[in-house]
Amino acid sequence: MTSILTYTFKNLPSSTWALRFSLRPLSCSSQLRAAPAVQTSTKKTLAKPNVRNIVVVEGVRIPFLLSGTSYKDLMPHDLARAALSSLLIKTNVPKEVVDYIIFGTVIQEVKTSNVAREAALGAGFSDKTPAHTVTMACISANQAMTTGVGLIASGQSDVIVAGGVELMSDVPIRHSRKMRKMMLDLNKAKTLGQRLSLISKFRLNFLTPELPAVAEFSTSETMGHSADRLAASFAVSRLEQDEYALRSHKLAKKAQDEGLLSDVVPFKVPGKETVTKDNGIRPSSLEQMAKLKPAFVKPYGTVTAANSSFLTDGASAMLIMAEDKALAMGYKPKAYLRDFVYVSQDPKDQLLLGPTYATPKVLEKAGLTLKDIDAFEFHEAFSGQILANFKAMDSDWFAQNYMGRKAKVGSPPLEKFNNWGGSLSLGHPFGATGCRLVMAAANRLRKEGGQFGLVAACAAGGQGHAMIVETYPK
């Protein structure tokens, strides 16, 4: 026990973190329940003079599924194509009107490295419509959307389709570097003698494959290990993490049963059944969750399979337009996409604190405060990550010592936070989650009568994103 405690404190960003936050445990048990609809008074709009208003007309996603289930025999472009085709059906937008298509993805299939282009062609878009793929870890779809926003704001485009896709059921597994080098050299060898000389250097260990891992290249640390250290740094208990995860699953199940997840569209899997809903929503009990062993820091860690997001297959797509173009085509948009920011921190000790750094920046940019936000939609990588961000956001000490700010921004109230579930329960296809977050915020604002939503997410590399979404007037 002494050794694990010594290890933990040696690897904290600062031992002061634990000392500070252990005195302020996050007790949210009484708040972990479904929240009532939020009714707010109309505030001023965030429209800016001489800047084009950019709107989300509609967004869809095929059901997010646990990896290794119904999508396991497909390829990423199959999922992306399904999302694009469903968007075309739901919006009835003429294909030739779309100026540009952008998709996010993280683990690329080498055969379709520009998955946006391959999926667009498969969905029947014109070969004259450009498409490109972006990657920015868990905020890849966010980057796809904001790249589209930039194209519209600059006047380069009027109509953008943005989305994202991930297929964790079939990730590229490479030969070892020694084996790859030998195979390439063999391909270049011109004589039998050269080939035999190369083959003579072969060793059995050349056949050891290189397996992909959800780990930081710069630190070689898995994200789950980082989450465990972060939870320890901010004194987030195992019970608090399990309670939060259970909340996510219960709210997701309620939203699914009540038909609130209206962005989910059915997908007929070739040769199989039609998938109609997310399959990772599994409300359990604290007693059952407590039986699970730590997944990363063993045996004393607090991050488990139950309070972590799971490997997920899925795709999403959104139709983004200049407001004047949307209205001219007869559309009633769902929301405005307003100010957004990207942030970046130390990937070792602050890997998952993107929302803490991005939230105050985007609020200041928009001229809003935390109290102005009616719907929060944050990416849930791990329960410990969400709860650590809550503590950091609610700490003047952290703001002053680590963020260079005079005061804390404050912690989002749980009654407004991820009310229809989050990545812990709905799933997290790395490249597709950003669009789900924005559509959840837009749909919640319309349902709950709010005006402003705040979307935020952390990402590998210590990066993060936040965006303000404003509901479109009814």
Image: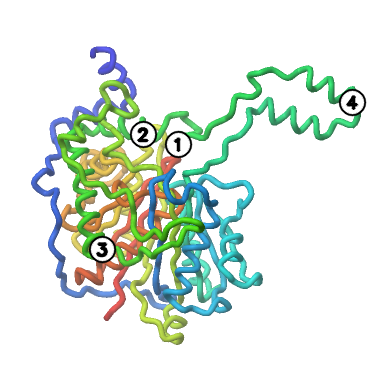
Q: Is residue 29 left or right of residue 185?
A: left
Identify residue type, mark 3.
Answer: Leu
**Helix, strand or loop under label 2:** helix
Closer to viewer: mark 4 or mark 1 = 4
Please give the residue where the numbered disc 4 appears in the rendered image: 192
Please give the residue where the numbered disc 1 appears in the rendered image: 214
Judge whether residue 146 can be spotted in this image.
no
Identify residue type, mark 4.
Answer: Leu
Neighbours of disc 1 within 10 Å: few (<14), some (14-19), many (20+): few
Q: Which mark is residue 203?
A: none
Looking at the image, tell me whether mark 1 or mark 3 is earlier in sequence order.
Answer: 1
Q: Which mark is residue 224?
A: 2
Q: Which mark is residue 368?
A: 3
Looking at the image, tell me whether mark 2 or mark 4 is earlier in sequence order.
Answer: 4
Identify residue type, mark 2.
Answer: Gly
Classify the position of the C terminus by image quarter. Answer: bottom left
**Helix, strand or loop under label 4:** helix
Neighbours of disc 2 within 10 Å: few (<14), some (14-19), many (20+): many
What is the distance, in whole Å, between disc 4 and disc 1 at their CAs? 42 Å
Closer to viewer: mark 2 or mark 3 = 2
